[in-house]
Amino acid sequence: MNELYSHYSKSNQKKLYLHLKNIANKSEEKIKNKDLDLTIIEKDKLIEISYLIGIAHDFGKTTTFFQNYLIHGEDDQCSHHGLISALFGYVLVNKYYDNELFSMIAYMVIKRHHGNLESPLEKMTETFNDTKQQLDNIIKVNQSKVKNIYNKLLVKFNFNFEDVLVNLEKIIYDEEDELIDKFREIVWFEKFDDNDEAVELFLITQLLYSVLIDSDKKDAAQIDNSYFKGAIEKRINVEDYIENCRKEEPEKFDVNKLINKARNEFLAEVLDNSQLQKDNYLYSLTAPTGIGKTFASFAFANKVKKFYPEGRRVIYCLPFTSIIDQNYEIFEEIIDFNLTEEYRKNPTKYLLRHHYLTPLILKKDVDLDKDSEETKQLDKYMDDKLLLESWESANIVTTFVQIFESIIGNRNSSLKKFHNIVNSIVILDEVQNIPPKYYRIVGKVLKVLAKRFKTHILLLTATQPEMIKGENVVSLVDDQKYAEADIFDRVKLEIIDNLKEKTLDEFIDYFDENFNSKSSLIVCNTIKSALNLFEIINDLFYDYEVFSLTTYQTPVDRNKKSNCNLYTID
């Protein structure tokens, strides 16, 4: 066999050298383009480590075991390439940086680049013996080919492949137990004077893993990323859109109406805040529902974008899939007004809705004179999915689950987008819906993500939780000013019997006596109680249409029912 391959099929016969070079260069470029203010490692060193991880990640594919599996389908235990590649990466980084901690991180990232990120000690001893056979095979059969590949890839470093191979051989044959003990000591005993540094290290690991797996997946699938070129640089002017709405719908947007006066004052106060600056990264916006926080937050994001000639990605996050569509439609109208045909021809370039129910179909070069047809080809769908799941679009509307699993989680499918969250503008709408038990960890991670990874974060809510405390959080408006305005005094709260506990029958009797004969919404704590109440109410009020909205129904059915202006039980 004259060539070593990384991937082999009728349509894709990629040489290993080119694949390693591509991944290393792309990983290096992704981190080089990030604006970082790290305390535990210099950015230049992080860039070089990402390169070394890239050239090491598929080192194990140089065995004849893997090449036979790749080309002929001959699978055995020694055809697996993760562990020996991870050990090779460990040696490379340690030789370059002489730092056990970051060498171990390189090991972690490489070992699990086809799985989920995990502890470096996980399952280490189960397959370690196979690396001896693999290394022996490389030395006896393919050493000259592998040497030729890596001496080219290591040309900018002051060491050659033979030196690395000697160190790798020493670890595999003589220092297995010592390496495991070393990793165990780092995992359990590595300490930082500042707890923020531990979070910073965690996020650095996520970043290195993200750039590797995203680059690897796209290169393996031969994905062209040029579709998104220039997307995040585009400026969107929310004020121009609102001014156009005043012309198109003068009655609805009448500036003399009290509600519109309050909304306009609110928007102006947000955008004129003197603390809305490039070097401030944490913001809060607390105001009542109905004042236009969605418009204001999107205007805020696009004002922040003006600080950066290269632009910034905007990621708008909501707690529930059921409330995403309305916000998405607002952003779509604003972006469509600003970009017109440019947006209509390539909508997913500029706006993406992403949650577990959305089909990820990339819409490219849409013919505006014809009805568009979405492709049903599986290969095309998987390519689109791979591109869109990494959040290359300029504006993302998504869920808390998506954003936090991509920052704090360990799943491969989620972390491939983490590098595109770094340096973005993240808006967390209805942030009070994050469970209080997660406030401490979420607050700590967001603070470090903002400060060290230069990510602008806005906490948006009517009732701001104490998640991120301190003088570094800029409040864009007076938290009480709009909440105390008469126009937002819209709720009459009546406490029944001092919250005395009632049986279901007692509640039904009370409801029957006090129902106003128009409509009503009853919110229950559990699906079971909602269903029980639904059956009773449905029998009792036979002149009314009664609905139960729970997750027992499909999203399509829930959406149909929730759009009915009828008496509803949830």
Image (cartoon, grey):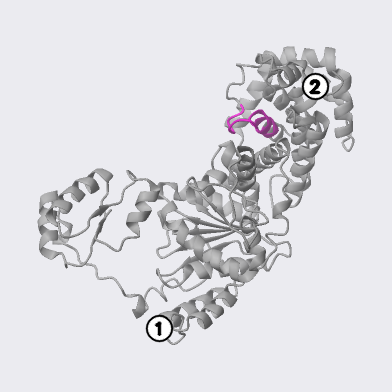
Q: Quadrant of residue 298?
A: bottom right
Q: Is 290 rendered above or below residue 440?
A: below
> Relative to residue 446, is residue 20 depicted above or below?
above
In the image, what residue occupies the spot 19% across and 60% down? Answer: 544
Type of amino acid at the residue the image marks with label 1: Leu
Give the CA separation, mark 2 to mark 1: 74 Å
Tags 2 and 1 in contact by the CB under 8 Å rule? no
- Of residues 271 and 383, the one nearer the viewer is 383
For numbered disc 2, what is the local secondary structure? helix
Please state the horizontal and vertical placement of residue 473, each as a whole percent of the image. 54, 63
Judging from the image, what secondary structure is the residue with disc 1 in?
helix
Residue 394, x across and y down, in percent: 64, 58
Magenta-drawn stretch contains 473: no
Q: Which mark is residue 258?
A: 1
| Left/right of residue 214 with respect to residue 517 in the rendered view | right
The magenta region covers 105-120
Q: Quadrant of the N terminus?
A: top right
Coordinates of residue 532 in the picture (x, y in percent): 19, 46
Mark 1 packing: few (<14 Cα in 10 Å), some, or many (20+)? few
Give the labeled residue for mark 2. 167
